Image (cartoon, helix red, strand yellow):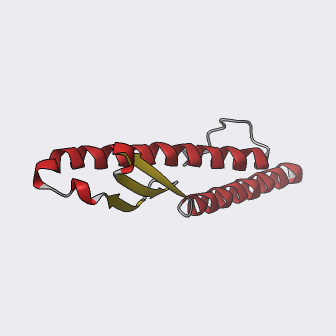
Amino acid sequence: MQNMEEMMKAAQEAAGKIQQQMQDAQVKLDTIEVEGNAGGGLVKVRASARGRMIGVQIDDSLMKPEEKSILEDLVTAAFNDARDKADRKANEHMAELQQGMGLPPGFNLPGMG
């Protein structure tokens, strides 16, 4: 039974190490920035690779009451562009991390994804 206990302890330690690496990866994703654009750059949204919006830039030419609905659409499109880029960056980062751990590509770790 000693051998089984040692195996269980080693498995728990490995799981704890992977969990810590995943938590560290989430923190790192929040430091990676992406920029989404819409309207040929009239609206820009900066976000973290984790999906947190950091800032919005709106060209002065859109700051007219009659442009309100266009502006709203462009902000939405720019945010969605930033979100798509954030998702791609996050997936790339997590794939690199999993490869570094020797896990198969696409391995779904609990709490991630």
Q: Is residue 56 left or right of residue 20?
A: left
Give the answer, above or below, for where 91 lies relative to 25.
above
Q: Is residue 80 left or right of residue 11?
A: left
Residue 44 percent location from the top left of the image: 38, 54
Residue farthest along the right direction in this orientation: 3
Q: Nearer the viewer, residue 24 or 59?
A: 59
Q: Where on the picture, by quarter, is residue 58?
A: bottom left
Give the answer, above or below, for where 37 lies relative to 58.
above
Number of numbered tags placed on the structure image: 0
Q: Nearer the viewer, residue 28 or 62?
A: 62
Residue 47 percent location from the top left of the image: 45, 57
Give the answer, above or below, for where 6 lies relative to 110.
below
Q: The C terminus appears in which quarter of the rendering?
A: top right
For image coordinates 37% across by 47% down, the residue present is 78
Residue 105 percent location from the top left of the image: 70, 36
For image coordinates 78% across by 57% down, the residue present is 9
Q: Nearer the viewer, residue 6 or 82?
A: 82
Q: Is residue 46 left or right of residue 19?
A: left
Q: Where on the picture, by quarter, is residue 55?
A: bottom left
Q: Where on the picture, by quarter, is residue 25?
A: bottom right
Q: Nearer the viewer, residue 85 or 52?
A: 85
